[in-house]
Amino acid sequence: MRLLIVGALPEPVLQHEVFDATGLLVARLDISWPLLKLGVEYDGEHHDDPAQHERDRVRRERLRALGWNVIVVTRDDLRDGGARILQQIVAAHRRYASWTAA
């Protein structure tokens, strides 16, 4: 994913740690732009496991509660070389960047 993003967007932060107000680690995002609170995560096959899927859901709810928007990328999203998902990431980045600039 990072290789798709390089050149299309400003350099992201890799493995950014997000903490809640108490200092508890909520998540380590694969790719992020912390100032925009925008993250991208790749969910491989092990995320299909029902227990893992539920942990992911709870974790992403906690991230949303902290103001984060997380785009989830799967293997299926990369079948077209990642073109469609990259457009979604670029659009989200532009949207959040315009909000923070205002």
Image (cartoon, rainbow, N blue to C red):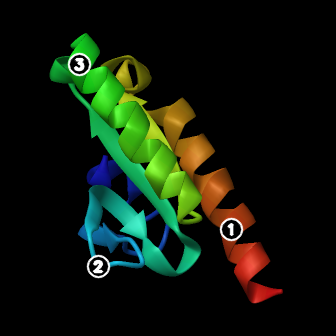
Q: Position of residue 46 (x, y in %)?
A: 16, 20
Q: Residue at coordinates 61% horizontally, 42% vertically from top-left?
A: 88
Residue under pointer 2: 23
Q: Which mark is residue 71?
A: none
Tell me whether circle 2 and circle 3 mark residues in contact (CB < 8 Å).
no
Q: Amino acid at mark 3?
A: Ala
Mark 1 vs 2, N-terminal side: 2
Q: Amino acid at mark 1?
A: Tyr
Q: Quadrant of residue 54?
A: top left
Q: CA distance from mark 1 to mark 2?
A: 25 Å
Q: Residue at coordinates 28% horizontally, 53% vertically from top-left?
A: 3
Instruction: Give the camera-side residue of 39 and 23.
Output: 23
Q: CA distance from mark 3 to mark 1?
A: 32 Å
Mark 3 vs 1, N-terminal side: 3
With 15 as the anchor, is 88 left or right in this view?
right
Q: Which mark is residue 51?
A: 3
Q: Amino acid at mark 2?
A: Gly
Q: Quadrant of the C terminus?
A: bottom right
Q: Residues within 10 Å of mark 2 (few under 14, many from 20)?
A: few
With 58 as the anchor, is 93 left or right in this view?
right
Q: Is residue 76 above or below residue 44?
A: above
